[in-house]
Image: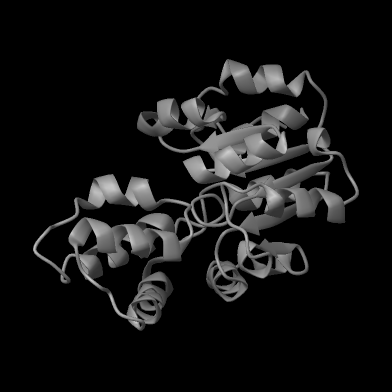
């Protein structure tokens, strides 16, 4: 079965990766890989931050800058940039507003259902988000049944990407070597975590982000379905 005709040509590097052997486990990030949530939630965050001080954060720049990182770390940096104290309830208010925005706007990544139906090896999700958010996002877009019992959250480990622990734990749970796994990520922090774990990683994003994804250590792809070339 061929990839859909509307997908861009599969990058040569991904084809080369296919010759190295079929992975025994696929580890998906959630935000930005399974669901298109990063721009939604980070747009809410930056809009809220821009009401706090005299400095205005550029949305395009800081969506990229905060992508895939632990929220508490992003908020500490924002306090320094804005020279403000956000208060103990800021994160909770952000999560409440982000939840509303996600409920109204969230969509599954184009092609992910096709990928999950065609995979013949185990797969799971490993995310820096809290489990409740992961599950909520997956339910909103109809993906929860695919990942029920297959969710790894950094919040339950106390260590966040770019720390590799969440990926290492996933490999351990599936009883495979790290070299036998494949990570799909969209953020620099997530790619760095995979590299630190010594797991091959594909970086999903539009072409203008490919140099950044490659610099972090990933083989860039534009469409999630391009990863299927590794299994052909």
* Residue name at image x 63 percent, y 65 percent: 158
- Total count of labels: 0
Horizontal and vertical percent position of residue 141:
54, 66
Query: Of 212 and 206, which appears nearest the observer?
Result: 212
Relative horizontal placement of residue 57, taking residue 145 as reference (left or right): left
Q: How is the image coloured?
A: one colour
* Residue name at image x 41 percent, y 56 percent: 38
Res 71 visible:
yes
Image height of 204 relative to 230, above or below? below
Horizontal and vertical percent position of residue 185:
57, 43
Q: Quadrant of the N terminus?
A: top right
Horizontal and vertical percent position of residue 187:
48, 44
* Residue name at image x 56 percent, y 28 percent: 217
Relative horizontal placement of residue 120, taking residue 206 as reference (left or right): right
**Residue 82: which quarter of the image?**
bottom left
Q: Quadrant of the C terminus?
A: top right
Image height of 172 relative to 75, above or below? above
**Residue 52: which quarter of the image?**
bottom left
Relative horizontal placement of residue 79, taking residue 37 as reference (left or right): left
Horizontal and vertical percent position of residue 226:
60, 32
């Amino acid at each position: 079965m061929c990839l859909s005709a509307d997908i861009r040509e599969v990058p040569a590097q991904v084809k080369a990766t296919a010759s190295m052997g079929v992975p025994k486990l696929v580890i998906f990030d959630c935000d930005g890989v399974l669901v298109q949530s990063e721009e939604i939630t980070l747009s809410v965050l930056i809009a809220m931050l821009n009401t706090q001080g005299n400095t205005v954060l550029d949305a395009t720049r800081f969506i990229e800058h905060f992508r895939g990182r632990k929220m508490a770390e992003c908020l500490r940096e924002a306090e320094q940039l804005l020279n403000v104290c956000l208060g103990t309830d800021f994160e909770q208010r952000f999560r409440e507003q982000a939840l509303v925005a996600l409920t109204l706007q969230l969509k599954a990544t184009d092609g992910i259902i096709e990928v999950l139906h065609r995979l013949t090896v185990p797969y799971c999700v490993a995310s820096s988000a809290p489990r409740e958010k992961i599950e909520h996002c997956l339910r909103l877009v109809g993906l929860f049944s695919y990942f029920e019992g297959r969710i790894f959250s950094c919040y339950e480990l106390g260590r966040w990407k770019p720390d590799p622990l969440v990926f290492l734990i996933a490999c351990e749970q599936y009883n495979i070597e790290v070299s036998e796994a494949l990570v799909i990520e969209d953020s620099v922090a997530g790619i760095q975590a995979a590299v630190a774990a010594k797991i091959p990683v594909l970086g999903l994003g539009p072409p203008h982000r490919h140099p950044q994804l490659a610099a972090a250590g990933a083989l860039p792809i534009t469409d999630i379905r391009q990863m299927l070339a590794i299994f052909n």
